Amino acid sequence: HNHIDHATAEKVQAAIATNDTHTVIPSYENLEKYNKSGGYEVLLRFRESGSWEAVQQQILDSGLRGLGGAGFPSGKKWGFVRGNAGPRYLAVNGDEGEPGTFKDRYYLERTPHLFLEGMLIAAWAIEAQRCFIYMRDEYPAVIEILRREIKALEDKGLVEKGYIDLRRGAGAYICGEESAMIESIEGKRGIPRHRPPFVAAVGIFGQPTLVHNVETLHWVARICREGPEILSSIQKNDRSGLRSYSVSGRVSQPGVYLLPAGSTILDIIEAAGGMAEGHHFKAYQPGGPSSGLLPASMDDIPLDFDTLQPHGTFIGSAAVVVLSDHDKARDAALNMLRFFEDESCGQCTPCRVGCEKAVKLMQAERWNQPLLDELCTAMADASICGLGQAAPNPIRLTMKHFADEI
Ligand code: SF4
């Protein structure tokens, strides 16, 4: 799945030798190739004589949900934004900062135009005056691909010059939180806003804003081109649709695996070539560090939106990390909290101070569980955004499932 062709591998080697890694562009489907397979026909047809409600219905029928991690039904979002008076904007969240997540990069480095056409379809549906793409700077190849292909779209007259505004993030995890991203797009320090109002009503420069993740828009284009059944017809374990799992850790072949949304961790490990040699499955992170760790004994849960809530966690952006008998859950949990301590924007006390205190308490040989529990409650109840609210998950799940280590 993470296959790099021979020519690209040679380019990578040459670039490493000359210390010029920023110029390595993997081979991808450019505008010419995309056009040959019917690319942008759907967009042009919609612009000519499409009904946005009919397109919205297709998106709703497919069951597509926001793949940045929140899982909100994508078609519904269009209705909310469209219900507010313009000018409206579209913002693409390409920050992909959740550790272990690399699916957006995977798609952008291969089929950038599926994403761009999906974005332009969504922009057409909500009559967006402008599109902002907020792309993480750690993906230089992706930024270069987008630069080239946006220019190609402008040259072909598919979009007006300047309609797509490509912005570079600067390495702050919190700028992947949608309201912090909007602050950053506006040129301010990226800190989350209080809600309500929601960005669908008051977003970029106070205007209604549709925020979508990169992969969500990739699927918008595919649904419009191939029909909603490409997602809705896939059923497994009472779940429908597909998920792009970013799989890393102690598996033979880490990579992005597109599997039915009802897949369990065992299906995912199998897709990734099984456990790495000499490793036995012990625990897994189902969806980024905010989701904490589950033990190997809980191996029959479909890893999808909604299915993990009863277990005190969530799928998020489907960043699956597999741990083995060589790893300690307490070390992994401490590492997660260290990450949150680093990345907390510092705006509110429960998160800024809470993460720091949690790291100190988790370094003790024996965890003070009542105190940690109290701290977790304060952080979850009183933090402004998802970072501080979910940071206790790794602590709580480790206390629950790996008590022998703490
Ligand atoms: Fe910032 Fe943390 Fe508060 Fe979110 S919860 S606003 S990251 S300090």
Image (cartoon, rainbow, N blue to C red):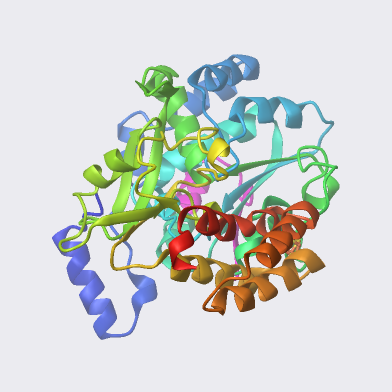
Q: Position of residue 87 (x, y in %)?
A: 80, 38
**Quarter holding residue 358:** bottom right
Horizontal side of 303 relative to 124 (left or right) equals left
For ligand 1, give the image quadrant.
bottom right
- Looking at this view, is 30 or 288 the one in front? 288
Question: As displayed, is residue 178 above or below residue 223?
Answer: below
Give left or right: position of 255 versus 120: left
Name the spot of residue 265 as percent of width and height, x first.
34, 43
Task: Classify residue 225 as left or right of residue 212.
Answer: left
Percent across and percent down for residue 54 are 59, 14
Question: In the rendered structure, which segment of residues is drawn in magenta?
Answer: 149-171
Residue extending furthest toward the bottom: 18
Residue beneath the point at 82% across and 30% down: 84
x and y percentages locating residue 37 in the rendered image: 31, 31
Q: Which residue is pictured at 30% across the width and 33% down the height? A: 36
Residue 262 painted magenta: no
At 72% from the left edge and 69% from the top edge, which residue is drawn?
Answer: 354
Q: Nearer the viewer, residue 302 or 245?
A: 302
Which residue is depicted at the point 29% across and 41% down?
266
